[in-house]
Image (tube, rainbow, N blue to C red):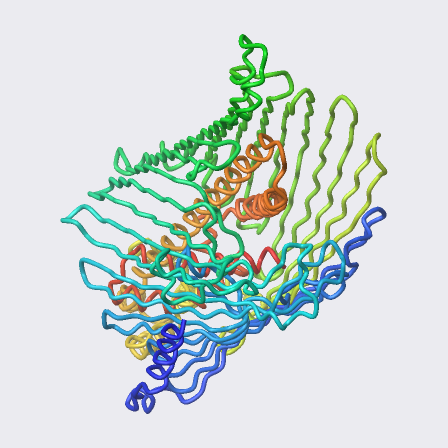
Amino acid sequence: MKKLVYILMLISSIAYTQSLDYDAITNAKPFKVSGQIAASGVYYNSNLNNSREPYTYFLQGLLNVSIYSFSVPISYSFSNQGENLGYQLPFNFNRLSLHPKYKWITGHIGNVNMTFSPYTLSGHQFTGVGVDLTPKEAFKISAMSGRLLKATEDDEDARTIPAFNRMGYGIKTSYKKERYTLGVIGFYAKDDINSLNVIPETKGVLPQENLVLSLEGEVKLGKYFNAQAEYATTAITKDTRAEEVDASELSPIALFFNNRASTEYYNAVRTRLGYTIGTVNLGVGYERIDPGYETLGAYFFNNDFENITIDAANTFFKNKLALAINIGYQRDDLDKLKANNTNRTVGSLNASLALSKRLNITGSYSNFSTFTNVKPNQFDEINDSDLLDEQIEDLDYRQLSQTATLTVSYILSNKKTARQNLVTNYSLNDVFNEQGGIVRLGDASTFHNMNIGHTIDFSERNLNITTSVNGTYNTIGREESTTWGPTISVGKRYFEKTLNTRLSISYNNTRNKASQSNITNLRGTISYVLKDKHNFSLNAIQLFRNSNSTDNLSEITATFGYNYAFGLKKPKLNFKKRTRKPKEENDSIKIQYRSYRYEGLPKEITPELLALPEKEGFAHIIKDKKRKLSELGEQLKETEEKDKRVYKEIALRYLMALDEYLDFAAFYNQKIYEAYLKLVREAKEIDRQIRDEFTVLSGKINSAKEKDPEDLERQKVLEKRYESHKELLQSLLRWDLKPEDIENPEGEIKIFKKQNASKVFSMYQNKKSEEHIIKFIEIRLADLFHKVLED
């Protein structure tokens, strides 16, 4: 432990004594402030549900202060959400963090989180400081120090989570060369036994201490193979009050740890061998985690399992067809000490097919099989007088979960006057439990869901209409239920698309043997963008539920949001309508350059040409050509009333001067769209992982004679995560960004393109890989989506 602290002190010393680049400071702008402020308030009223606060507010923001070459991004999040819970939690809802940066040195101060690896520090929030040192050289370092949990006394409320004051310290180092990477991770955490007046032993909360060491590496084997591996070992003391003992022979990590009678040692290992050639990707992975493995640097950790996975992906027919296959096998009870053991087989197939520019088909299938062998009590078997019964065989238990999805998207019309899309989604989830080779009545469940949606967009009228019909048929055990209902949504934009309105209504009817209910949902949304800096939004939802088995429900939720972006130069919006003179046929000209076409009077074409950089989102990144463009722009204005051939020649020269930026505009639009599609794919994958984990845990709970409280609590957490992520995924799909929405942006997308154009253009000029650029855009798209969802 002392050695780990010494290393942390050395890192702090290195970070403090870095020499400054005075040339860069001298040539940089002395002071710059930019950022974004978001505020929202939620009003809620219900005739039945009174547990929720009637009014909740959220304040979030990002402030970036730059002084010469230094930058200090400051983010904050405040809410009254946790003020009136009535019970205590060992963490804060309100957060404030600073991330000062100078060249390759980045600090983290306040309420932050860092991730070293899944087995050490993995996303745990802490209040303290951290640093990332990423010089261009091969050696890189990350370190942290702070409070993981705050002291929380047990107030005898069942919902209160008592905790000791827990401090944590960690360091991650890596050495990277062209063909290999080596890394060492150390993490230490300890509870302060004196931070609580009374130790809540009845809730199983005892003072703990933990030290984790990890070695990780990656190496390229030849031209096409790549191998990755991580080995971690943990020493965890369950009760620091226990007496000290000598355990140096048990594990090498014991040499660095305060060993006690309650100290336990565990290991974890993960490896993967990958093969890549062209569009073909193959991989084989192995993971083993000892029973009892734990780290205080993660909120939840699975252990006692062994995984073997195989994955393959490839594209066919000139990238029109993409296939990805994953197969996995998992088993537990590695020490053969459990009352039952479980093995699981997982298989999934994802496919996407672009039959034409209009027709796209995507589908997926996953098969999740769990087999549990309940070990009989040997004394029950000895005392069994009936030697012919098959009771032992009946203890075998198998659960199979199958999920299939199919999405068909077809562009009915792609005309400027009216674009029409038709999307059909179907999903099937089938789960059954088999015991002794028999599926008993009531042990099978099937879920069918189908949705058909039609969208028509009258772009010239700024009008959008969406209609859909949703239907589900479920059999849960011996019960059957059906749900169906239509939805219609109308959106209209005003004042040069700065004022957006949308009104929708949906109706659902649910029937089963015992009850019937009708739900009507009214939703209204209005947003207004002022000078591209101020964004106001109001969203109201009114829900009515009538049921013959429960009380009728009426609830309303209204959300008001305000977003302000500052520190960036924004164009002024002109709301005055231009009065155009009637065209004279003889004065009309045509200009065509690449995909840009202009036709009309020179006076009508000039404003369109001059507004082109702003329209394509790169006006503020033009540097070397700005003076030349200004001169050509003046020449355009001077020759409007003169010779048409001279005007046309100047217009073409103006477009040619923009050539590099026009290339970038097309590239930028395409990468934004690809980043959005990647974000959707990853959200679907996370949704599948959460669903699979919930299914496995449910099978484990159902097969257990005695329910493990930790498993039950984890089941509730997973269920809530699944519901919230499912809603998040559905919202992401409803966002439904299309290429034309990016090419002709409005609202948040328009602001997004302008805010990130400079950075993407810099990466574009520096020949950064497309994967690197897409990842950069994807992260910022995710931030934008969450802000849009909150508003």
Front one among 136 and 408: 136
| Residue 36 shows in this picture | no
Report whether 102 appears left or right of 578. Answer: left
Q: Quadrant of residue 56?
A: bottom right
Give residue 9's position: percent from left, percent from top.
38, 80
Give residue 406's position: percent from left, percent from top.
47, 30
Report the quarter where the C terminus lies: bottom right
Report the quarter where the N terminus lies: bottom left
Q: Quadrant of residue 681?
A: top left
Give residue 160's position: percent from left, percent from top.
71, 58
Give residue 463's position: percent from left, percent from top.
59, 48
Front one among 363 and 613: 363
Please count the marks in the image.
0
Report whether 389 appears left or right of 214. Answer: right
Residue at (42% x, 39% y) in the render: 334
Residue at (39% x, 32% y) in the render: 349
| Residue 649 shows in this picture | yes
Q: Residue furthest left?
A: 222
